[in-house]
Image (cartoon, rainbow, N blue to C red):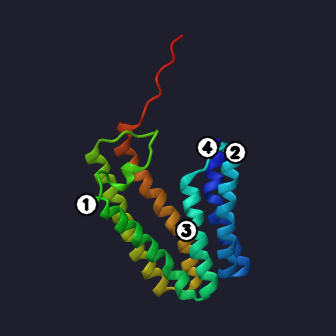
Amino acid sequence: MAAMKTLLDLLPAAAFFGAYLYGGIYTATGVLVASLFFVVIVYRLWKKEWHKTHLITAIVAGVMGGLTLYIHDPAFIKLKPTVLYAVFSVALLGSHVIGGKVLLARIPQATFQLPEPVWRRVNLAWAVFFAICAVLNYYVAMSYDEVTWVKFKTFGFTALMFVFMLAHAPFLMRYLQQDEPQQP
């Protein structure tokens, strides 16, 4: 089951890259949006519930992908992730001063039960990570050709996100919820 979820999560990036290689950036944008909604539908049929992260991602991609296809400007395509990463960063930072809990602590968690100070540090780490991603995307988008940017966007940011999440593991393992042992 975990392998199926991993495949579902990786499908849009793989579909985007494959479509880019065979049809260009605009074809890849349409394929990405379609594959994200496909993941939402598959997850809904498979788990009998809506995966909120997939659904929100698909909706945002639908709006931004629609704008991409409408505007038809390569600069917009390349700078769009910079803006999105910056918005994520600002939202995460803003949640430190607005509301009772930081943004990440508001997401229902079945796996981790973190004390409020730990949530604040994790939330801040993600805000900094997204700010770095915004700057990095801008640099790559402005300094390299479209093919290099697409490769970096598809594989580089995926690898960065994976490494960043792995870096959290040793710190968060002590807060991992243990299943209760079953009585004989």
Q: Amino acid at mark 4?
A: Ala
Q: Residue sitting at 57 percent across and 87 percent down?
A: 74
- Disc 2 designates what residue? 46
Q: CA distance from mark 1 to mark 4?
A: 36 Å
How many marks the image carries: the answer is 4
Q: Which mark is residue 10?
A: none
Determine the secondary structure under disc 4.
helix
CA distance separating discs 2 and 4: 13 Å
Q: Which mark is residue 60?
A: 3
- For label 2, the SS is helix
Q: Which mark is residue 97?
A: 1
Pair 1/4: label in front: 1
Report the amino acid beneath label 2.
Answer: Trp
In the displayed structure, would residue 29 be above or below residue 182?
below
Whole-Å distance between the Cαs marked 3 and 1?
Answer: 25 Å
Q: Earlier in the sequence, mark 1 or mark 2?
A: 2
Relative height, residue 94 to residue 53 (above, below): below
Whichever of callouts 1 and 4 sits on the residue coming sooner in the sequence is: 4
Residue under pointer 4 = 2
